[in-house]
C-alpha cells in the first residue's frame, strides 16, 4: 500500500520566511487554531482568505497553491 504526503505550500512559505503560525494568525486576525488547521491540511482557507494570506506574506497567490499539473504522487 502506497502512502502519499500532501505538501502544504502555506507551511513551506511560512518556513521559508521564518514566520510562525501564530504570526500569521495575528496578522490576519484569525485564531491560532484556524491557521494551524490550514497548515496541517485539516481545513482549507477560502479563495478570499488565500488572497489575504498572499498579501500578508508578500507572495503571489499561486505560490500558495500546488499545480494541478504536479507529478507528485
Image: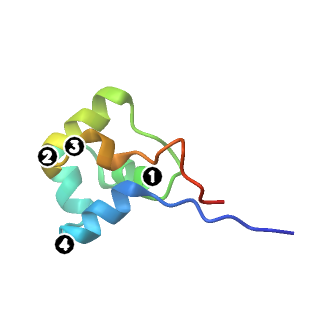
Q: Give the Cα distance between marks 3 and 2.
A: 10 Å
Front: mark 4 or 3: 3
Q: Which residue is mark 2?
A: 56
- Count residues near mark 3 (Cα–Cα under 10 Å), then give few for <14, some for 14-19, many for 20+: few
N-term-proximal mark, 3 vs 1: 1
Numbered circle sitting on residue 60: 3
Which residue sits at x=48%, y=59%?
40
Q: Which residue is mark 1?
A: 37
- What is the quadrant of the C terminus in the image? bottom right
Front: mark 4 or 1: 4
- Asked if marks 4 and 2 touch (Cβ < 8 Å), the reply is no
Front: mark 3 or 2: 3
Which residue sits at x=39%, y=30%?
46
Query: Is 42 left or right of 34, judged from the image as shown?
Result: right
Which structural element holds mark 4?
loop
Which residue sits at x=19%, y=72%?
18
Q: Position of residue 60 (x, y in %)?
A: 21, 43
Does residue 67 sit above or below 20 in this rendering? above
Which structural element holds mark 2?
helix
Which structural element holds mark 3?
loop
Q: Give the Cα distance between marks 3 and 1.
A: 21 Å
Does residue 36 sit above or below 64 in this rendering? below
Residue 29, can we see it? no
- What is the quadrant of the N terminus in the image? bottom right
Query: Is 65 left or right of 54, judged from the image as shown?
Result: right
Numbered circle sitting on residue 18: 4
- Asked if marks 3 and 1 touch (Cβ < 8 Å), the reply is no
Q: Position of residue 37 (x, y in %)?
A: 45, 52
Query: Is 71 left or right of 34, judged from the image as shown?
Result: right
- Count residues near mark 1 (Cα–Cα under 10 Å), then give few for <14, some for 14-19, many for 20+: some
Amino acid at each position: 500500500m502506497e502512502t502519499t504526503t500532501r505538501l502544504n505550500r502555506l507551511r513551506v512559505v511560512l518556513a521559508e520566511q521564518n514566520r510562525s503560525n501564530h504570526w500569521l494568525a495575528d496578522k490576519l486576525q484569525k485564531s491560532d487554531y484556524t491557521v494551524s488547521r490550514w497548515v496541517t491540511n485539516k481545513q482549507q482557507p477560502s479563495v478570499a482568505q488565500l488572497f489575504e494570506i498572499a498579501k500578508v506574506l508578500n507572495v503571489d497567490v499561486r505560490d500558495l497553491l500546488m499545480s494541478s499539473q504536479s507529478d507528485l504522487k
